[in-house]
Image (cartoon, helix red, strand yellow):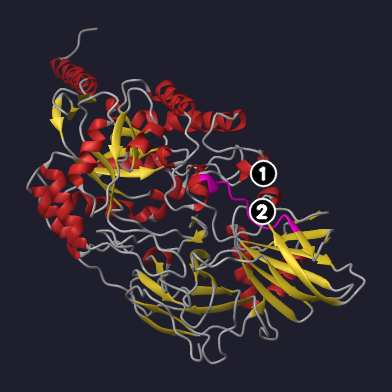
Amino acid sequence: MALSPMRACILWLLLTSYKFIVQSEAQRTFSIDYEKHTFLKDGKPFQFVGGSMEYFRVPRRYWDDRLHKIRMGGLNVVNFYIDWSGHEPEPGEYNFRDNYDLSAYLEAIKKAGLLAVVKPGPFVCGEIDNAGFPYWLVGKHPHIQYRTMQKEYVHEVEKWFNVLFPRIMPYLYKNGGPIILVQLENEYGHLDGYCDRNYMEFMLSLQERLLGKDVVMFRSDSPIKFRYDCDWVRDVLVGGNCYPKTNITDAFSEIRLNMVVPGGPILVPEYYTGWMDYWGYAHNKENPQDVVRTFDEMMKLGANVIFYMYHGGTSFGFKAGTSNTAPLVSSYDYGAPLAEDGDPRPYYYEIRRVIEKYMPVPQGTLPGQTRKLHLGAIRMNGGTPLNEVMEHFREKGLLRQKRSKFPMTFEEFGLDFGFMIYKTKVRLQRARMYNVTLHGLSDRAHLSVGRNRHVIQAFSFDPDEKTKLYEKVLLREGEELSILVENMGREDFGPKNKDPKGIRRVTADKSTMTDWVMEAVPVRRSSDVKELMRFLEHRDGEPCKGPPCFYYGFFVLPKGQAPLNTFLDPSNYTKGVAFVNGINLGRYWPVEGPQVTLYVPGIFLRSYPAKNVVVMMEIDELPEENRREVSFVNRPIIGQVERSGS
């Protein structure tokens, strides 16, 4: 059948457009010119400035806003880790939804006009619980050795990468996506005394098989020779992580000397804008002027620099890990150019001005400060004892419980985060004081027997202070011994990374206590938190006489008031976890600091006339009767809350 002139014209346009698209995609290449010491994007020299922003630390509805601010800051690349533990929370159960929708995040990056540098791990550090390894690895393989050629570990990594990498493939630059670089492992050279080049070769071969040998990969360490010797592997570009006070001349010289293939471009995969904060330690920060000055120096030398962090976000819930045995705060603000709430700091604009000297930056209105919500005191009720909460869940058949001769760790029990209660009966014929030792404890425990309560803390705020895992406790036969253990985050770095939580054995002097009942405190799963909120709202009984205790309160935003970003101020409370509308904001510990307030994204709040519910799980000390309220303030508070008489 002959085509009409109009149909023939349309068909010609479609075929021509398709041919153009195919040719354009075929021409998309990203590679290295080792003679000219540069990256090549579509065959042309390419220099980039990147910024780190993790999808799992920023509410999904804010991704577009934050990525736009990154682009307007002059950056052309965004860098992020992939969190295995969040994508496979239980064996074989994969999560690529909501804040873990990796495809949606890569699409958002592309829409923002940015390219991507991806760090798939499997070890990512990143100050997240267990460095990104799923908690269940230790429960499933008790003798597993992370980051080795041990068959159990290799099997689990291969299985995970076989799920992950097919999702990444469509977003490689060569396939029309934003991904230009993929990291190999992560700072493996810092695993002092455990170097295995066979492991690095395994990781490289695995990524080459799944992504292709034409994808540019890199490894990164502090620019020190023995670090590079530790994670040496063929063909891969070497990057060097730097601080604002790093001697750049020496660092770049070391990077060049350790190039496996001489002549590669200078890559700084992590240029630190700040540092992590630890509970009980002073607030860590860098001088923004040093950050800008050293960045300018690196750009003059033609380096490709990624700011770590550019927008740190928040370790909501129980996501914050422990680093070198010191638990980390919930905020991951990091002193970054974009603050935890997404607002630009003054040096955001200074960085943009430096970038503008070396490459084009997008034109348009630059982002500024946003309005925040400030509310007065929110009245909280008299509290509900933890024991009542546990009994409610027990009666409804919703409580997770197991029995064992000896205490089970969280991993053996199958509990990823939160709190667990261990109970047993005292079987000691003689009533007296005993040294009760909690073997295997690496966090905090509240030991209760009769009316006596003891807190045992396995870490110290003084690096020179030796901790003890025992307390002198009066024990009488037949009494119930109850131990509440808080998981404050698994280790995220080095050989200590394998960090089971809970306790393994309890002794009273030399006698081992047996026949334990373990129960998970129902604050981990969203369904449990919803049931908890219903129970607390309708519960009618005596107020708490001692911790642990749940406090309930609510507020309604004024009519016409938009739900804006704000910060929960828990200064009247001591230590615990805060929830707003069923969302776990993270841990609070204002008496230790340095974090006092908890960031509350506006999207977590409900507009008038809906009720906004606040729940405080206080585990250390009851607030004064006339000072149970919490408030919402329009700026973060960093420091330490002083209590009267302290």
Kind of residue at disc 1: Gly
Q: Position of residue 23 (x, y in %)?
A: 20, 19
Q: Can residue 186 be seen in this view?
A: no
Q: Where is residue 152 in the image (x, y as percent from the top left)?
A: 62, 31
Q: Where is residue 71 in the image (x, y as percent from the top left)?
A: 20, 49
**Residues drawn in magenta:** 495-505
- Is residue 500 a member of the stretch shown in magenta? yes
- Image quadrant assignment for residue 32: top left
> In this view, which residue lies farthest toward the top?
1
| CB atoms of marks 2 and 1 within 8 Å | no
Horizontal arrangement in the rendering, residue 435 relative to residue 318 (left or right): right
Query: What secondary structure is found at the residue carrying circle 1?
Result: helix
Horizontal arrangement in the rendering, residue 493 relative to residue 50 (left or right): right
| Residue 475 against residue 113 in the figure, above or below | below
Q: Is residue 219 visible?
A: yes
Which secondary structure type mostly characterizes the magenta part of the structure?
A: loop
Kind of residue at disc 2: Phe
Would you name the residue on which mark 2 appears? 410
The answer to which of marks 2 and 1 sits earlier in the sequence is: 1
Crowd rating for badge 1 (residues with CA inside 10 Å; few <14, some 14–19, many 20+): some
Query: What secondary structure is found at the residue carrying circle 2?
Result: helix
Q: Residue at image x 53%, y 78%?
A: 574
Q: Residue at image x 48%, y 25%?
A: 198
Would you name the residue on which mark 1 appears? 139
| Residue 283 against residue 181 in the figure, above or below | below
